Image (cartoon, rainbow, N blue to C red):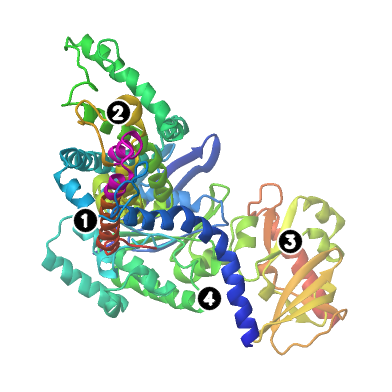
Amino acid sequence: MSGAEVTLKNIFKSWNESPALNDISLDVPAGKFTALLGPSGCGKSTALRIVSGLEEPTSGQVFIGGHDVTHTLPAARDIAMVFQSYALFPHLTVAENIVFGLRVRGLVRKQRDEKLKATAQLLGLSELLDRKPSQLSGGQQQRVALGRAIVADKSIFLMDEPLSNLDAKLRAEMRDEIRALQHRLGVTMLYVTHDQVEAVTMADQVVLMNHGRVEQMASPRVMYETPATLFAAKFIGTPPMVTFSPKLLSHCLTPNFLQKSHGLTFGIRPESLSLSDNGLINGTVRNVEYLGADTLIECKVGEEILLCRAPGWTQLTEGTPISLAFNVKDLHVFNTASGQRTAEMLPEIEMALSSQNASSKLAR
Amino acid sequence: MRNSAKHQWIYAWLLLSPAMIFLITFTHYPAVQTIISSFFSTGRGRRKSVFIGWDNYDTLLLDEVFWKVLVNNFWYAVWTIPLSIILSLAMALWVNDKLRGRSFLRMAYFTPTVLPLIAVANIWLFFYTPGFGLIDQIRGLFGFAEQNWMGSPDTALYSMIAVAIWKEAGFFMIFYLAALQTIPPSLREAASIEGASKFYYFRRVAFPLLMPTTLFVSINAVINSFRLVDHIFVMTEGGPNNSSSLLLFYIYEVAFDYWDTAYAATLTVVMLVILTTVAIGQFFFLDKKVHYK
């Protein structure tokens, strides 16, 4: 079994005038793990259902393995799907649920049993084959749903928030398991989730969606390090990137420069800020959240709130004045109106700030 | 401790008693009294009713009309029960789909249930009228001869069966429709991804999940096949030559036209035995095959 690539080309989908998907184009590389990420209502599940064929796009094309399957029935698309609710047949046993599709396709009993045995072993379900879904725990039901997908020998797996009904511990376990399974089977995985941690930890490629559009399509690392939009910057990361107006740095930028930077938004990751004796940003501690390895410091600077991730042993009390330093390379610049990442003025900003940095170091 | 336990008993009885008084007065006592009456003669004028043992039952075995209505009732049940269930299921599946005018269709199917059977019978009386009734008019278009649907012994019973099915199917459809809507759509989707046809999905998934409803509906259908006789009063009065008479109609005739109440009680016992046996049998036989959520 090996994967096939999936391509969506200019997909539009609307229900009674209200658009759900607005010109979606994306590539899911063969044999890779792609996560469709976004807040609820962003259209990610609709996109998945269009790939599966359960929903037809209003316009646009779907390609699987290079073939146009826009109007092909779900069963002929070489896909297997795991539903959020698992969609197990409640009156059938675990074994019957797993081989349901094989029976539909008229596979002989001997082959069915062999495949069932192999799949059950792979997922640790061998002891549970005679049970009904209602007699299983959430995690076990999830495995049965996976089993039904695996046994079908399809080259593309579609998963619609498969872990959202599990508790936190089990979710972490299943995350590893699904990831390992995808590696082992070599299938193409398209995985819908609203949990950015899930997407970042599991996927080779993340497709971030918002309001029926693709915000960014990149590897988790690229998406974290260079978010293409303000939305991406604020969606990825725990806690997400903090954004602020250039005015916050007014004391170290020339008035001329400030005027030019009107209409820009700066962003910085909490871990890029560090406590310093004389950094560029001066504020007061508003709140301290102790997380064990780290301490999150909420710092009030003028009207804005910045977040700084400091080592766990840092001890500060509210109201203490602090100074924060950062590397200019870690500063992200966005156009406020369009939300797009921009490189315009970046050299000027770098120059202005690094000279300030130098002078503040000098003063020390 | 003992005191409070005692109080709870009193509460329980107080809460149960209103329903129980009615049940005993109108159901259990009459049932028992019926069985007792069936062993007595009918009292007339000065002749008091006396214990006659199995005499009524001997009469019953020799009563040709009794056997006739029993056979009629058998065919009535054999046709109405499966047909009304199949029809109601088909209608429910249809109006459960996404289609135009769905709510209108649902209402239309349910209308016969709302109408009193007496009114329904009058409508059908017009349908069946020889010559200018609706059915004969339609048949006339294709050049068929007139047919006296209710007046001929060959067709009278089947005319009654058609009315009963028409009346019942919409009612059962509502139960099927409610059950269908509790089946999550993702099951349908999962099956279609596996390549299951509509029919395969129905056979392996939807129908088994509807079994509790089928059990409920079929028990009701059985009871109704003995109980629904109102239209016979209006349409045929059991005729011609008892060809459309059913057990309950015959019981009514014996009891309130001929005033032979003891014999009517005997007939009623037969009906009770039949209904109880069928209901218990159905429950135990089908219950094993029913998946309850």
Three-letter code for the amino acid on which mark 2 is drawn: Glu
- What residue would you read off at disc 1? B54
Three-letter code for the amino acid on which mark 3 is drawn: Ile
Q: CA distance from mark 2 to mark 1?
A: 30 Å
User: Label 3 near label 4: C-beta < 8 Å?
Assistant: no
Badge 4 crowding class, 10 Å Cα cut-off, few under 14, some 14 to 19, many 20 or more, is: few
Q: Tell me the element at label 2.
A: loop
Three-letter code for the amino acid on which mark 1 is drawn: Trp
A61 part of magenta stretch: no
Image quarter (top left, top right, bottom left or bottom right) of the C terminus of chain B: bottom left
- What residue would you read off at disc 3? A349
- What residue would you read off at disc 4? A168
Q: CA distance from mark 2 to mark 3?
A: 101 Å
Residue A298 shows in this picture: yes
- What residue would you read off at disc 2? B237
Badge 2 crowding class, 10 Å Cα cut-off, few under 14, some 14 to 19, many 20 or more, is: many
Which residues are drawn in magenta? B248-267
Q: CA distance from mark 4 to mark 3?
A: 42 Å
Q: Tell me the element at label 1.
A: loop
Which chain does the numbered disc 2 sit on?
Answer: B
Which is the main secondary structure of the residues drawn in magenta? Answer: helix
